[in-house]
Amino acid sequence: MPHSTGWSSRKDERSSKETPIGDVVEGLLREPLFARGMAVGRLAARWEDVVGPKLAAETTPESLENGVLVVAASTGPFGAQARFLADEIRAQANAGLGEELVEQVRIVVRPEVARRGGSPTGSDG
């Protein structure tokens, strides 16, 4: 199992008693370490609704911490487009999340961002 420095501060008791998986999941979701990633997971699941199909194929939400949504773009031009739409992305992300968690959108360019739509050359044929 991967080790995270965030687990060293856990103070809960360990038990060999069987626990329903739903209880385990609920407990994990109360942990700040896991709760931080839930909003990004929800955004990633509906990213195309947030930014549209073309931009969704070239960008991905990477993190959301302290109100800052980091969006990775595959190229500089797609990064520029996302920067231009940052206010709209913020509004759509908050609408999709159902709460005002995103205060700012920061764009980074990462060529390794997988294109999810079309061919690598950008044409579908």
Image: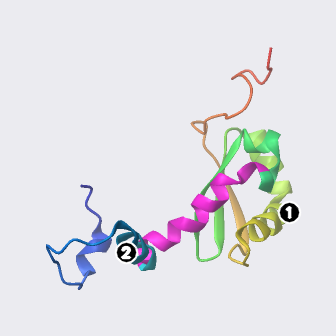
The residue positioned 79% from the left and 69% from the top of the image is 95
Q: Main secondary structure of the magenta part?
A: helix
Where residue 13 appears, as percent x and y from the top left, is: 19, 84
Viewer-nearest of labels 2 and 1?
Answer: 2
Residue highlighted by disc 1: 88
Please name whichever residue, 91 or 121, is drawn nearer the observer in this view of the structure: 91
Quadrant in which residue 97 is drawn: bottom right
Q: At label 2, which amino acid type do we have?
A: Asp
- Can you say which quadrant of the picture contains the N terminus? bottom left
The residue positioned 71% from the left and 52% from the top of the image is 47
- Whether residue 71 is visible, yes or no, is no
The residue positioned 24% from the left and 84% from the top of the image is 12
Quadrant in which residue 120 is drawn: top right
Does the magenta-highlighted stretch encompass residue 98?
A: no
Q: Is residue 1 left or right of residue 53?
A: left
Which element type, helix, strand or loop, lies under badge 2? helix
Residue highlighted by disc 2: 23
- Whether residue 73 is visible, yes or no, is yes
Where residue 34 appears, as percent x and y from the top left, is: 44, 69
Q: CA distance from mark 2 to mark 1?
A: 37 Å
Q: At label 1, which amino acid type do we have?
A: Glu
- Can you say which quadrant of the picture contains the C terminus? top right
Where residue 89 appears, as percent x and y from the top left, is: 80, 61
Which element type, helix, strand or loop, lies under badge 1? helix
* Magenta extent: 31-48
Which is more N-terminal, label 1 or label 2? 2
Please name whichever residue, 77 or 122, is drawn nearer the observer in this view of the structure: 122
Residue 17, numbered circle:
none
Where residue 11 appears, as percent x and y from the top left, is: 23, 85
Dot 2: few (<14), some (14–19), or many (≥20) neighbours within 10 Å?
few
